[in-house]
Image (spheres, rainbow, N blue to C red):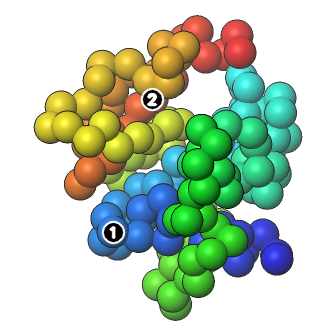
Amino acid sequence: MDTRDLFARLIKCEAGGEGEDGMKAVATVVMNRVRVPYGEYHTVCQGNLRKVIEQACQFSCYKVTIGGVPNNQNVWVLTPDPVHYQIADWAMNGGIHLGTGSDALWYMNPFMPQCPNFFPPNGNGYWFTRINQHCFYNPMPSYAQT
């Protein structure tokens, strides 16, 4: 599977129910990880989209099992629609969702009305905005040391 197809599948799996706005926001975060010039994503992924997608413990949709239970909603099962390829192409060609901007490195669905103030669990991101069901987080200065 080529990287474009994998990215389209990730967009569908991670944000397919969030509408175009939510899918573009998630795609922006993925590409922000490709472009960030410091920290863990820069060190581990070296500006490579495929490495960002395949980095361990980052996207639940890239896992076939979660906690020993089969994950039936994953990139290997879902087939992207044309809109998912359009958003993947848009993001890979420099598109940035203005609501998340070029800094957001994380998103999560808290399954509750309020977003936690900090994410991921190591506290390197602070809450920036919410778009549909996802909360988006910008890096704290401590992220540069990861």
Q: For mark 2, what is the residue?
A: 138
Question: How many numbered callouts?
Answer: 2
Vertical placement of 24 versus 33: above or below? below
| Residue 95 drawn at (x, y percent) | 52, 64
Q: CA distance from mark 1 to mark 2?
A: 23 Å
Quarter of the rendering occupied by the C terminus: top right
| Residue 87 numbered mark, or none | none
Taking the image as shown, residue 30 lies to the left or right of residue 16, namely right
Q: Earlier in the sequence, mark 1 or mark 2?
A: 1
Instruction: State the residue at coordinates (64%, 42%).
Output: 68
Q: Amino acid at mark 2?
A: Asn
Query: Is any part of residue 58 visible from this angle?
Result: no
Label 2: which secondary element? strand
Vertical placement of 97 versus 134: above or below? below
| Residue 57 drawn at (x, y percent) | 67, 37
Instruction: State the residue at coordinates (74%, 39%).
Output: 56
Q: Residue furthest bottom?
A: 82
Vertical placement of 144 versus 50: above or below? above
Relative depth, front residue between 38 and 88? 88
| Residue 45 drawn at (x, y percent) | 81, 41
Relative depth, front residue between 45 and 115? 115
Q: Amino acid at mark 1?
A: Gly
Q: For mark 1, what is the residue?
A: 17
Among the 4 quarters of the image, the one containing residue 78: bottom right
Instruction: State the residue at coordinates (36%, 53%).
Output: 98
| Residue 96 drawn at (x, y percent) | 48, 57
